[in-house]
Image (spheres, rainbow, N blue to C red):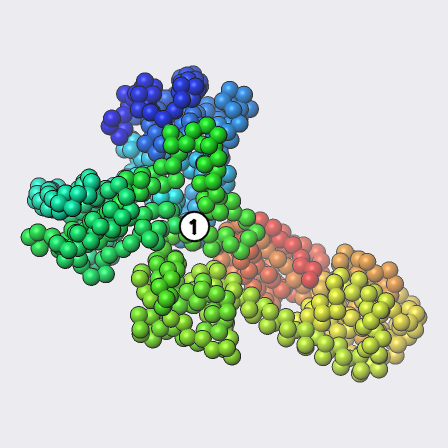
Amino acid sequence: MNKDNPKITIEDIINEINYLTDEEIDKLKSAYEYAKEVHKNQKRLTGDAYIKHLLNVVHILITLNADSDTLIAGMLHDVINIGGVKEEDIKDKFGDDVAMLVSGITQINRLNYNGTNETMIANHRKILVGLTKDVRVIFIKLADRLHNMRTIYMLSDEKKKENAKETLEILTPIAHRLGINKIKSELEDLSLRYLKPDVYFSIVERLNKSKNERNKFVEEMMDNVSTLLNEHRIKHEIKGRAKSIYSIYKKLDKGKRFSDIYDLLALRVFVDTIPDCYQAMGLVHSKFRPVPKRFKDYIAMPKNNMYQSLHTTVFGPNGNFFEIQIRTYEMDEVAERGIASHWSYKEQGKNLMKGMEEKLQFFRSIMEIDENSEEIDTKMEDLKDTIYVYTPKGDVIELPYGSTPIDFAYRVHSKVGDSMVGAIVNEQIVPLDYVLQDNDVIKINTNKTSTPSKNWLEIAYTNQAKNKIRSYFNKIDKAEYLKKGEELLTKEFRKKKISVSETLSGDNLKKILDDLHLANINDLYINVGSGKISVSHVINSEDDTKEETILNKVIKDNVDSEYKGDIIVEGIDDIKVNRAKCCTPVKDDDIVGYIQTGIGINIHRSICPNISNIKERLISVRWNDKTDKKYSTNIMVYTDGMKDLIFDIASVTQSNGLTLKRINNIKMDGKYSFEIKVSVPDKEVLDKYMNALSTIEDVTGVERIIK
């Protein structure tokens, strides 16, 4: 059959399947009739009936040996999204598994992919994979996209490029990770054809010009290798292997010349057993000199997607380089179809479902992503290009391309990373920002007294290493905060002649911890040491005097305040007050006073959570109408994107006649937010300003901050 076959029929499909039961085939026929009825009035841009697209998708899935439920779901994959069918109807007619698969492909087909940088692209891959409950949904998605790419010529040039870019950046890395080379290579070539047609057809033309000559060389080499293996009675099959156009493009793009691409002349040798693989490789090397550093043993060290094969490049007849791959027939199944190579007729009945579940476990470590987990980015790094490097003992370590010795050290062990002082790669000392390459042998020098540097966060490439470095410093910071907090409290207690041992023990300690919502005394010290809780707040959590006594002490001990006269305390003249830094009240806010021993009266907004559970020490206060000062307050501006809005915020602030005292941009959940400190005369002006901020494009919310 042609790759795109508008004349394909359900009979053609049935004739191709040799691994389904009669009952499963009948169910597939029913799915065909059902889909044909749902899509009966729908046509594609090619003019073909829509059912032809579905038949082609199923045909692609058959080449992957997909199980019956996947084939049926492939036939029905658009009945919800385009046909308007309900999931319950599919469940009633074809069962829970098929309904789940159709629902899954419908969900990911509704995603809108548009990214301009690697972070956004990786995030799209993450979302697609994260939403997938069963790896078979990805198979249907890939088959659907492959047929769409085969018929993309009907779209506008802009739409062609858009689809090709999405395919190349989002879907082919997933196909690679799942080991489905059969689909990955064709998707890559088709994407290049529409993204860079000049480059694509230039490569095709050069290949065509040299095709006859290359075929001659390949046939001669095939005869030589086959004769060699026959002499040693090794059963085998040999095929010439065509280099994909996209892989040639990638090598040319890296600066290689066409004549320097070794595997333009390539053979693939198939044998029955693993010992035959190694014996065949030894015989090839005995007759044809291997090119140094071009031998790779993926049988002893399979790739993560289960790919196995022996690779070598040798000097062949007429001075030509030949890349030769040697593998068993079963290894070739895995190489072309990935996990799907184990489905179908090889396991029957209950054993089929049990076997599939076991084989899917590896992929569910990628599929089931917890959005709150620190492992998200680490797992998604597996979708990028990987390198294989070695310890001095020969242990292989897999890392994403771009990794440094720091990433290697932390991948070996946290202690190795924390105590690292230097690295030696291939017996040469290298800087810590050296980018590791395939087959590097790395030795990490350590010192027990050495510790990480915060600069490493800028050098490390993997999130695993960065998280371990942050974890180290979090522990160090906590220890320092704990010590500092204990010293600050002890010093202040002694200064005020308060017993530390009595106050920070028993019921007194419990009350302080409850008031401050803390778990234990160490949390208290850490919060004080880090500045989250003031020493005075801790001391005044202790209820040791009556309100009248405290008030008298406040009046007696009051100190100069920036806000003298701004706020009136009923019945008391000339009392000093301080605005609370946590809720930063401004004139005309609803406020309440909180009496602090030896400090004064702190003025809070009535809604401030820091006083919401306090019943004593609160007194009535009000704003002085005659005050004309300005007050600083804190605002958070939330946005729905990655755009830097600092200029827009500054412009709105200036147009409202206000002073911007500070602005910080904060990245939250992949989006920017902005923390603002602004000076305003009263709440009315503040409300007007916040409304103006909310009209800025991409702003989704504006609120005052209470810390």
Q: Position of residue 613 (x, y in %)?
A: 81, 58
Q: Position of residue 165 (x, y in %)?
A: 34, 44
Element type at mark 1: helix
Task: Name the image quarter holding the C terminus.
Answer: bottom right
Residue at the image point whose x is 49% and y is 22% from the top = 94
Amino acid type of the residue that numbered disc 1 sits on in the rendered structure: Ala
Residue at far left of view = 318
Res 598 visible: no
Give whichever of 91, 581 is nearer the camera: 91
Q: Is residue 354 above or below residue 517?
A: above
Residue at the image point whose x is 29% and y is 54% from the top = 297
Give whichever of 258, 337 is nearer the camera: 337
Q: Where is residue 254 in the image (x, y as percent from the top left)?
A: 24, 57
Task: Name the image quarter holding the N terminus.
Answer: top left
Residue at the image point whose x is 84% and y is 79% from the top = 498
Give whichever of 208, 136 is nearer the camera: 136
Residue at the image point whose x is 36% and y is 68% from the top = 392
Res 126 visible: yes
Please tell me how crowded label 1 is: few (under 14), some (14-19), or many (20+) other residues with Cα within 10 Å. many
- According to the picture, the residue beneath numbered tag 1 turns out to be 122
